[in-house]
Amino acid sequence: MCQDILSIHPKIHFSCYINRNGRIVESRLCDDRLIKDLTSHELEIRHMQCKLQSSMNQEFEDKVGHLDYTLICRESIFEFIFPFYEGVIFVIVDKEIPIQSTSKKILQLMTVFGFGSNNLR
C-alpha cells in the first residue's frame, strides 16, 4: 500500500506503516533528502512519536469526533499521520501539494485496502 500512496502525487516523498509499537512494518521512499541527516535511533524515535501522537489524539474521539488524520506543518514539508488498523500510516509531502485532495485520496486508498477511517473506530 505504501507504494500506492506514493503514486497518488509526484510530490509525495515518503510513506510507511508504523505498527502499534511504533515500528515500521512497510515503507517506501522516493526522496531520501528528508531523512538522510537522521540517525537510525532518531528515525526510530520519530516513528514512535507518530504512533503516540495519533493514539493520544484518538483519546478524545468520544468528545470531539473521529480522527481522520493529523497534519503537521514543517518549514518545507507537510507530514500526515493517518490511523490505520492498530498502527498509523505516516506520509511526508512537499508543501506545494493540495492538502485536501491528497488526504482524501489517501483515505480512499485505505478504504480500498479494507481499512477505511470508518472501519477503524
Image (tube, rainbow, N blue to C red):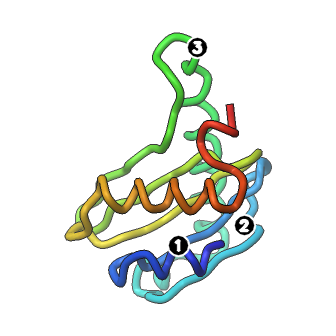
Dot 1 or dot 2: first in sequence order is 1
Residue in the picture at 29% in, 72% down: 94
Q: Quadrant of the N terminus?
A: bottom right
User: Element under label 1?
Assistant: helix
Dot 3 or dot 2: first in sequence order is 2
The picture places residue 2, in percent across and down from the top left corner, at: 61, 74
Residue in the picture at 63% in, 41% down: 52
The picture places residue 7, in percent across and down from the top left corner, at: 48, 82
The furthest residue to the left: 96
Q: Is residue 43 above or below residue 80?
A: below
Badge 2, how many Cα within 10 Å: few under 14, some, many 20+? some
Dot 1 or dot 3: first in sequence order is 1
Task: Determine the image quadrant of residue 75.
Answer: bottom left
Residue in the picture at 56% in, 40% down: 53
Label 3 sits on residue:
62
Q: Is residue 81 above or below residue 92?
A: above
Alpha carbon of mark 1 to alpha carbon of mark 2: how far? Answer: 16 Å
User: Element under label 2?
Assistant: strand
User: Element under label 3?
Assistant: helix
Label 2 sits on residue:
24
Task: Determine the image quadrant of residue 61.
Answer: top right
Badge 3, how many Cα within 10 Å: few under 14, some, many 20+? few
**Tag nearer the camera, 1 or 2:** 1
**Badge 1 amino acid:** Ile
**Badge 2 amino acid:** Ile
Label 1 sits on residue:
5
Q: Which mark is residue 32?
A: none
Alpha carbon of mark 3 to alpha carbon of mark 2: how far? Answer: 28 Å
Q: Is residue 63 above or below residue 115?
A: above
The picture places residue 37, in percent across and down from the top left corner, at: 46, 81
Tell me whether the residue at label 1 lies in contact with that at label 2, contact meaning CB atoms closer than 8 angstroms: no
Tell me whether the residue at label 1 lies in contact with that at label 3, contact meaning CB atoms closer than 8 angstroms: no
